[in-house]
Amino acid sequence: MNTSSNSSLLKGSLSVMILRLLEDREKMYGYEITQKVKDLTAGEMTITEGALYPALHKLEADGLLTTETQIVDGRARKYYSLTKTGHTEAAGRIAELAAFLENLNLVLKLKPSL
Amino acid sequence: MNTSSNSSLLKGSLSVMILRLLEDREKMYGYEITQKVKDLTAGEMTITEGALYPALHKLEADGLLTTETQIVDGRARKYYSLTKTGHTEAAGRIAELAAFLENLNLVLKLKPSL
DNA sequence: TTATATACCTCCAAGTCTTAGGTATTAAAT
DNA sequence: ATTTAATACCTAAGACTTGGAGGTATATAA
């Protein structure tokens, strides 16, 4: 993903974002996730498909997500939802990321005098 | 680096943290950086040496840092400081990270109804 | 008829990190 | 006297994530 125009910044946050979105929506397909992130960030963050699909497949392989394919308007959609384990893991990983971000801010917000 | 006990979360933030610390301190050595981060985060974030030194060397190779070795108490210390380019780049990368973090929060803070 | 949006996928290269190892000095503890 | 902990630097191998490029296919709009 990127911010405004450029490069990848934080590797490791994508899977947490996916889990977070699925906590609220309980059923989403890949393309929908890319659009949702774009919407939420006013187009500033883009989830590339080359990152998204491998991430989804890994989460599924790890037992955090299950899939269900539907045909809508002649196109196949693969819906992902959190498993029981997925719900538990999601909460843990989100908390972990939140804690990390707080610590990151402690380092970044540091002023000249401190 | 880690939060509390575990794994790496955000790859890519280390070099920005280094640049940020050097904006304020204008001269730091590797070991000092690990300790500073530990202090600032109450021991919750640990910069591993296997990540730190390659990161410092890359920043130096990219022309953002210069080095100066001193012997203190019989031990060699390699001090790093921002170059002119380093100062400019630091500001840019910090702003970029800040923007990314804001967007990340837009995704993560999302409530069930939104 | 062509381009755009929707919708999935894989592979490769690049980059970052963890783990584990190495060297060496000084100070504290046993 | 000797071992451990703290200080201080370093590298190499492997895992993992990501971006970019490419591929397939349908529906709709231009």
Image (cartoon, coloured by chain):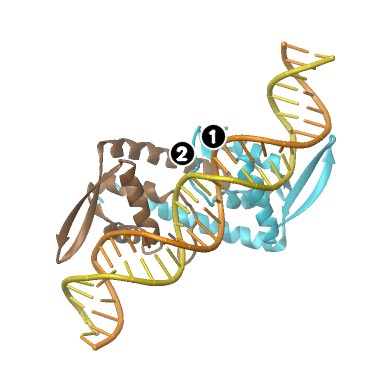
Chain colours: A brown, B cyan, C orange, D yellow
Pinpoint residue B73: horizontal percent, then vertical percent. Answer: 84, 34
* Residue A88, picture quadrant: top left
Residue B88: quarter of image: bottom right
* Viewport quadrant of the C terminus of chain A: top right
Amino acid on which the number 2 mark rests in the picture: Ala
The three-letter code of the residue at mark 1 reads: Glu
Q: In front here: C2 or B22?
A: C2
Residue sitting at x 58%, y 61%: B92
Residue labelled with disc 1: B44
Position of B101 relative to A87 (above/below): below
* Chain ID at mark 1: B
**Screen quadrant of the N terminus of chain A:** bottom left
Q: Tell me residue B41's x, y (percent).
A: 56, 36
| Residue at figure coordinates x 21%, y 59% from the top left | A77
Residue A48 in view of the camera:
no
Residue C30 versus residue A99: which sits nearer the camera? Answer: C30
Left or right? Give the position of B73 relative to B3.
Answer: right
Q: Secondary structure at mark 2?
A: helix
Marks 2 and 1 sit apart, C-alpha to C-alpha, by 9 Å
Mark 2 and mark 1 residues within 8 Å of each other at the beta carbon = yes
Q: Residue at x 39, y 40 (%)?
A: A93
Question: Which residue corresponds to mark 2?
Answer: A99
Please provide percent x and percent y for residue A45. 40, 60
Position of A48 relative to D9 (above/below): below
Q: Residues within 10 Å of mark 1 (few under 14, many from 20)?
A: some
**How many residues crowd mark 2 within 10 Å: few (<14), some (14–19), many (20+)?**
some
